[in-house]
C-alpha cells in the first residue's frame, strides 16, 4: 500500500498569500497596536485552534529558524505538539522546547518565563482581537473609537470589575495601550504576563484567523496596562513556590492531585520548570 | 411729568378662527393709555369685553395686530408689540410680572419653591429666595405645614394665594394683575390690597383687572374703560 | 442665562433631503444659552428629521447650522468627525425616547453615568463613583441601586438614568427626542418636573421634540410648530399656544385637553 506524495509549498501557504500576510504584518509593526484586516486563509485545522497564529508563523518562518510552540505554558500538549509537527513537515524547520534556543515562539496563552531577547519573534493565536467588543458589539463603532482615540469605554469595563469585585478582576486579555495610542487586547495571555510586553526586546505578532485581523508590538515599545489612579493595574501574584522546581515569581498552574480537592501548584512554563528542576 | 412706564398706543386685536371658516372676531381697536410709576391703572368694562386680552397683549401671550406697547426700562425702550421672543422673555424676567387667578405649576414642586422661583431665575440664592417666599406665604395665610407640598393638592383659594405670592415676590417695575382677588375671603383680599400698595409705594406701575368694586375703589388711580371691539378711553 | 449676546445655535434655511424629497426644509431659528426650544408637530411633520440634522446624525443638504464654540459661530458641517465627537463628549447631550437607545443596558447604573466622565479623562475610580452617586441622587434614583443594571429598572428610572448620563459632564446643549412619551402619565409629570429644574439649575440650552403640547407648555420658552417638513409657526410658547395664528396650530391647540 502506498500513499500519494503531496508536495506542499514551503510552510504550507502559497507565496502570494504569505506576501499578503507579510504586508499586513509590516503595517501592524508600523502602527503598533492597530488591527490590520487581512484575508485569512484556510489551514488544515479548525478556526479557533490557532489558525491566525499558524498563518503568521508560516509567513515569517525561514530555513534558519528554530520553532517553539506552547499551549498554556506547555510544549507537550496536543495542540502544541501538532502545530510543531505541522511546521516540521511543511517547512522543514528545526523545533525546540527551549525558549532560549527558539527564534520563533508560537503561543496560545503564555509568554515564557525566560526573558525574551532581541531577534526573537512571539506569535500569538488570538481568538477575539477587539478589546471593546464585549461592551460595543458594532464593528463600525469600535473602529471609529480607535480612529478617534475614544477609549472611555474600556474604563467602564474596569469600573464594572471594581464595582462588582472590589478590585480589577480581569486576569487575562487585560487591555493595554500601545505606544500611547492604540488600545490593544494582548489576548489571551494572563495579566501576569502583561509587564513582559512593556519595552520587550522581542517582536510580538498577533494573528486572529477567524476574525481576520493582524496586529503587532515592535521591540522596545511602550505598553501600558490600564488602570485607575486609585486602582492601578496589578498583575496576578502567586504565593506558593512551584512544587516541582521551587521557583517563585512565576505563573502557576493548579493541579488537582487527589479526589478530595487537594492541589499543588506547579510552573505553567514547562521549559522553565525543567531547567530549574535540573539545577 | 415723569415718562410713563408703559404707553399703550392705538393697539388692535382681531382673532381669526380658521376652524370656523376663517371667522374674524374683533376684540380691540385703537386702544391707548399710559401707566406711570407708582400708578395703579384698572381696566374696566363688562366681562368678555377683552380686558384680559389687553393684559395678555402687554405680557406677550397674545400678538398685537396694530399699534405699539412701549415699555420703558433702565435697559432702554422696548416696543412689546414687535419685540422678539427673547426680548419679551428678558422683559418678563426683569421688568414685568403677571398674576392671574389660576396657578399653572409643575406638578411636584413644593409650594415654597413655586413661590421662590422668580427670584431664583434672577440669580438669588436658594435659601434667601425661600426665606422671602416663606414670608409672603405667611402673610397670605398659607400655614407652614403646607409649604413643602405641591400646590396641586391645595384648595382653589390656597392655590390662588400661592400664585399671588409668586407674582409679588420679585421686585418688578410693572405688574399685570388679572383678577387676583377673585374668590378670596375678605382678610386675604385685604392682604393683597396691602401688597399692591407696597408695590405702588416702591414705585411700581400696576395694570389690573379687579372684578371686585371694593378692591378697585381702594387701589385705582385711574380706570380705563374698555367697550366692545373699540378702544377704551380714560374715565 | 438668557441675555448672553450671541446665540448658541444659529440655523438658517436648513434642510435635509431623503432622495428627491425634503424631510424638513427652510428651517431658521436661533437658540440662546439657557433657552428651551420645543419642536412640535405630528408624526411625519419633519420634527425628528430636524433633530437628526441638528445632532449631526443627518446631513444638512441646504442652508446652514452654526454652533458657538468658544466665541465663534462655527458651521457644523465644516467640523471633522473628531471635533463632532469631542462636542458629544463635552458639550452636547442626547436624550432618546427609548432609554435603551441611550444607555448600556448591561452596564451598571454607576458605569452608565461614569462613562462620559471616563471618556473625558477621569481616571480616579473613587471620584467617578462619588460623582455617579451624586447624579443618581439628583435624578432621584436610590444610591443603593448604583451597581444594578438598567435592565432591572422601571421605565421612569431608566429615563432618569439616561438624563443623569447626559448631564453628568455639564453639557451646554441637550437634544431630547420625545423624552416622556414612553411613560405613564404620573411618571411623565415627575420626569418633566425633573428636566425642568435641572435645565434651570444648570442653565442648559435644550431642543426638545414632542408631539405633546402640554410638554411644550410646561418646559419650553419658545416653540416651533412643524407641518409637512416646514416650520409653520414659531414664537414664545405661551403665544403659540394661547394665540395661534396658523390654521394647523389652531387645530393642534384645540385638540389638547385643558390643563
Image: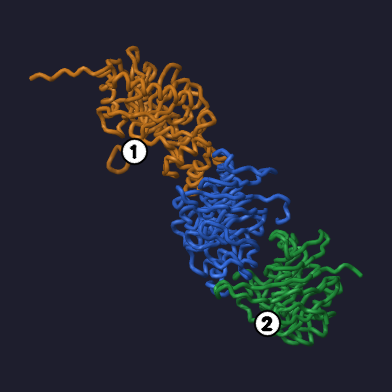
Chain colours: A orange, B green, C blue
In the rendered image, residue C37, in percent from the top left (x then y), is placed at: 61, 58
Q: Residue at x 51, y 47 (%)?
A: C58
Q: Which residue is mark 1?
A: A263
Q: Is residue A235 left or right of residue A6?
A: right
Q: Which mark identifies residue B48?
A: 2
Furthest-left residue in this view: A1
Task: Check the residue under mark 1 and report the chain it is in.
Answer: A
- Residue lying at 50% horizontally and 27% vertically, measured from the top left: A198
In the image, is residue C59 above or below residue C217? above
* Above or below B200: residue A97: above
Q: Is residue A229 visible?
A: no
User: Which quarter shows the C terminus of chain A?
Assistant: top left
Instruction: Report crowding for label 2: few under 14, some 14 to 19, many 20 or more residues within 10 A (C-alpha).
Output: few
User: Residue A18 in the image: x percent, y percent?
Assistant: 34, 21
The answer to whether marks 1 and 2 sit on the same chain is: no
Number of numbered labels in the structure image: 2
Residue plotted at (45% across, 18% down): A117
Q: Is C224 left or right of B97, judged from the image as shown?
A: left
Residue at the outermost top position: A64
Of C182 and A1, nearer the camera is C182
Q: Which residue lies most toward the right here? A: B1
Residue B198, position as x, y percentages in the image: 83, 75
Tell me if residue A120 comes above or below residue A193 in the rendering.
Answer: above
C246 relative to B142, above or below = above
| Quarter of the image with the N terminus of chain A in it | top left
Examine the rendering and report whether any part of residue B135 can be seen.
yes
Amino acid at each position: 500500500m502506498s500513499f500519494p506524495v503531496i508536495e506542499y509549498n514551503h510552510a504550507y501557504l502559497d507565496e502570494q498569500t504569505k506576501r499578503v500576510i507579510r504586508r499586513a504584518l509590516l503595517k501592524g509593526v508600523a502602527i503598533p497596536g492597530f488591527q490590520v484586516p487581512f484575508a485569512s486563509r484556510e489551514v488544515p485545522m479548525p478556526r479557533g485552534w490557532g489558525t491566525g497564529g499558524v498563518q503568521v508563523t508560516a509567513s515569517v518562518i525561514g530555513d534558519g529558524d528554530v520553532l517553539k510552540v506552547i499551549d498554556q505554558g506547555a510544549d507537550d500538549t496536543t495542540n502544541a505538539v501538532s502545530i510543531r509537527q505541522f511546521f516540521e513537515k511543511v517547512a522543514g524547520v528545526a523545533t525546540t522546547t527551549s525558549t532560549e534556543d527558539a527564534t520563533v515562539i508560537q503561543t496560545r496563552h503564555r509568554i515564557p518565563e525566560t526573558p525574551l531577547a532581541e531577534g526573537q519573534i512571539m506569535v500569538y493565536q488570538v481568538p477575539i482581537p477587539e478589546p471593546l467588543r464585549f461592551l460595543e458589539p458594532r464593528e463600525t463603532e469600535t473602529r471609529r473609537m480607535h480612529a478617534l482615540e475614544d477609549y472611555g469605554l474600556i474604563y467602564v469595563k474596569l469600573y464594572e470589575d471594581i464595582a462588582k469585585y472590589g478590585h480589577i478582576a480581569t486576569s487575562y486579555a487585560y487591555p493595554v495601550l500601545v505606544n500611547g495610542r492604540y488600545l490593544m487586547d494582548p489576548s489571551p495571555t494572563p495579566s501576569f504576563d502583561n509587564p513582559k510586553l512593556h519595552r520587550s526586546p522581542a517582536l510580538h505578532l498577533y494573528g486572529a484567523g477567524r476574525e481576520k485581523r493582524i496586529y503587532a508590538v515592535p521591540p522596545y515599545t511602550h505598553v501600558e496596562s490600564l488602570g485607575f489612579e486609585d486602582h492601578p493595574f496589578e498583575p496576578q501574584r502567586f504565593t506558593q513556590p512551584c512544587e516541582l522546581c521551587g521557583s517563585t515569581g512565576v505563573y502557576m498552574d493548579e493541579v488537582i492531585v487527589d479526589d478530595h480537592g487537594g492541589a499543588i501548584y506547579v510552573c505553567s512554563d514547562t521549559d522553565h520548570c525543567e531547567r530549574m528542576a535540573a539545577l | 411729568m415723569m415718562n410713563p412706564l408703559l404707553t399703550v398706543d392705538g393697539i388692535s386685536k382681531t382673532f381669526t378662527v380658521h376652524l370656523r371658516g376663517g371667522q374674524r372676531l374683533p376684540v380691540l381697536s385703537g386702544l391707548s393709555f399710559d401707566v406711570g410709576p407708582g400708578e395703579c391703572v384698572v381696566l374696566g368694562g363688562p366681562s368678555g369685553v377683552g380686558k384680559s386680552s389687553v393684559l395678555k397683549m402687554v405680557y406677550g401671550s397674545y400678538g398685537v395686530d396694530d399699534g405699539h406697547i412701549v415699555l420703558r426700562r433702565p435697559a432702554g425702550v422696548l416696543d412689546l408689540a414687535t419685540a422678539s421672543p427673547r426680548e419679551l422673555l428678558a422683559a418678563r424676567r426683569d421688568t414685568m410680572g403677571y398674576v392671574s387667578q389660576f396657578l399653572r405649576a409643575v406638578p411636584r414642586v413644593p409650594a415654597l419653591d413655586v413661590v421662590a422661583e422668580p427670584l431664583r431665575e434672577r440669580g438669588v440664592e436658594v435659601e434667601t429666595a425661600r426665606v422671602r417666599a416663606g414670608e409672603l406665604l405667611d402673610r397670605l395665610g398659607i400655614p407652614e405645614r403646607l409649604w413643602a407640598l405641591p400646590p396641586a393638592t391645595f384648595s382653589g383659594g390656597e392655590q390662588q394665594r400661592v400664585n399671588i405670592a409668586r407674582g409679588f415676590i420679585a421686585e418688578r417695575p410693572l405688574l399685570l394683575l388679572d383678577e387676583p382677588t377673585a374668590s378670596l375671603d375678605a382678610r386675604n383680599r385685604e392682604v393683597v390690597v396691602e401688597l399692591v400698595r407696597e408695590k405702588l409705594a416702591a414705585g411700581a406701575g400696576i395694570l389690573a383687572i379687579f372684578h371686585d368694586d371694593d378692591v378697585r375703589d381702594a387701589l385705582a388711580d385711574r380706570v380705563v374703560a374698555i367697550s366692545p371691539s373699540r378702544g377704551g378711553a380714560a374715565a | 442665562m438668557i441675555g448672553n449676546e450671541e446665540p448658541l445655535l444659529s440655523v438658517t434655511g436648513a434642510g435635509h433631503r431623503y432622495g428627491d424629497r425634503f424631510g424638513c426644509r427652510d428651517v431658521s431659528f436661533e437658540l440662546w444659552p439657557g433657552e428651551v426650544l420645543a419642536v412640535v408637530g405630528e408624526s411625519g411633520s419633519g420634527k425628528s428629521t430636524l433633530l437628526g440634522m441638528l445632532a449631526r446624525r443627518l446631513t444638512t443638504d441646504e442652508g446652514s447650522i452654526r454652533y458657538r464654540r468658544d466665541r465663534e459661530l462655527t458651521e457644523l458641517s465644516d467640523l471633522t468627525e473628531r471635533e463632532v465627537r469631542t462636542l458629544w463628549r463635552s458639550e452636547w447631550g442626547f436624550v432618546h425616547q427609548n432609554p435603551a437607545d441611550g444607555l448600556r443596558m448591561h452596564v451598571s447604573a454607576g458605569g452608565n453615568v461614569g462613562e462620559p466622565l471616563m471618556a473625558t479623562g477621569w481616571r480616579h475610580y473613587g471620584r467617578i463613583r462619588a460623582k455617579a452617586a451624586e447624579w443618581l441622587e439628583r435624578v432621584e434614583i436610590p444610591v443603593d441601586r448604583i451597581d444594578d443594571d438598567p435592565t432591572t429598572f422601571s421605565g421612569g428610572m431608566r429615563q432618569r438614568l439616561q438624563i443623569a448620563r447626559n448631564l453628568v459632564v455639564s453639557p451646554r446643549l441637550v437634544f431630547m427626542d420625545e423624552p416622556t412619551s414612553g411613560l405613564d402619565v404620573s411618571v411623565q409629570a415627575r420626569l418633566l418636573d425633573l428636566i425642568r429644574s435641572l435645565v434651570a439649575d444648570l442653565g442648559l440650552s435644550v431642543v426638545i421634540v414632542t408631539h405633546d403640547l402640554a410638554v411644550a407648555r410646561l418646559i419650553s420658552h419658545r416653540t416651533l410648530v412643524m407641518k409637512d417638513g416646514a416650520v409653520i409657526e414659531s414664537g414664545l410658547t405661551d403665544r403659540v399656544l394661547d394665540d395661534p395664528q396658523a390654521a394647523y396650530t389652531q387645530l393642534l391647540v384645540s385638540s389638547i385637553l385643558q390643563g
